[in-house]
Structure formats: C-alpha cells, structure tokens
Image (cartoon, rainbow, N blue to C red):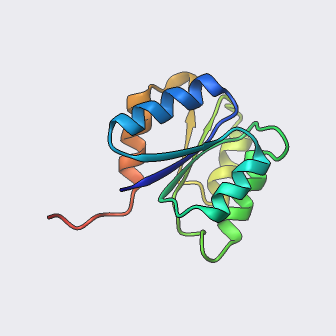
Amino acid sequence: MTKVLIIEDEISLQDLYADFLREAGFNVSTASDGDKAVELINSLDWDILLLDIMLPKLDGTEILKRVKTDPKLKLKPVVVLSNLESDLIVKECLDLGARDFLIKSDITPQTILDTVNKYLPSKPQA
C-alpha cells in the first residue's frame, strides 16, 4: 500500500487531506510540527511527502533541505502545500527539489489526490 506523509499544522486541513487519501486507499501518516515531521520522515518508509512551509518548531523549507540532501530520501517526491504565494518562496522550494508547489487556498482534496497520483513512482500493471 502506498504511504503518504502529510506535514500540516492546520489540523482541520490535515484531517481533511488524510481522510480523503485514506478513502482512496492510501496509508497516511501525519505530523503537525517540524520536529515530529523530521522524526516521521526518518523512521517511516513513505512514498510521497506533502509538506507545509509554515510549521512550528522547524519550517518546511528546512525540512525540504534535509530531505533533499539525504542520499536515502532525495529521490522521493515532495509536494509543498502553502498559502505563501511569494515567487521567491516558490522558486526556492522548486530549486531545492520539490516536485510541485500548491497554494492551499486554491486546491481541493481531489487536487491533493490527483497530485499524489501524478508524482508517485510508476507501479507495474497487474
């Protein structure tokens, strides 16, 4: 089963995304702060990371840097979710290796599902 890791400090959004992805058949783990995120990123075998930027304790940009400099994790897809629409932040995240940058106020749970499916490694057809 595909494992999605959601790092989001807005609990209502975290629950919405997690419930929607679980209903679609994904195994979902969540964290709401940067410290817990780092712990889960390093201890779980995840397939895709949905990462908020504005987080307590450690921001998403720093987490993204850590993931993309870790030889075991750097090829795994990371999608940034944020309400920060600054071109500089978007560029920084994409330059650091994020596959996509989604503005939370512009997306739906279906957008999250479509994005997860878009960036998952190809699975052989049965």
Q: Which residue is farthest left?
A: 126
Taking depth in this image into account, of 113 and 107 the one nearest to the observer is 113
In which quarter of the view is residue 51 placed? top right
Taking depth in this image into account, of 123 and 30 the one nearest to the observer is 30
Question: In the image, residue 11 lies at what x, y percent?
Answer: 64, 27
Q: As displayed, is residue 81 above or below residue 68?
A: above
Taking depth in this image into account, of 39 and 13 the one nearest to the observer is 39
Taking depth in this image into account, of 43 and 87 the one nearest to the observer is 43
In which quarter of the view is residue 105 placed? top right
Q: Which residue is farthest bottom?
A: 71
Residue at image location 40% in from the left, 38% down from the top: 22
Q: As displayed, is residue 28 above or below residue 70?
A: above
Question: In the image, residue 101 lies at what x, y percent?
Answer: 57, 42
For the C terminus, which image quadrant? bottom left
Q: As displayed, is residue 18 above or below residue 59?
A: above
Residue at image location 22% in from the left, 67% down from the top: 124
Q: Is residue 104 left or right of residue 10?
A: left
Count of number-bearing discs: 0
Q: Is residue 73 left or right of residue 123?
A: right
Question: In the image, residue 97 lies at what x, y percent?
Answer: 61, 60
Residue at image location 33% in from the left, 43% down from the top: 25
In which quarter of the view is residue 1 placed? bottom left
Question: In the image, residue 66 lies at what x, y percent?
Answer: 73, 63
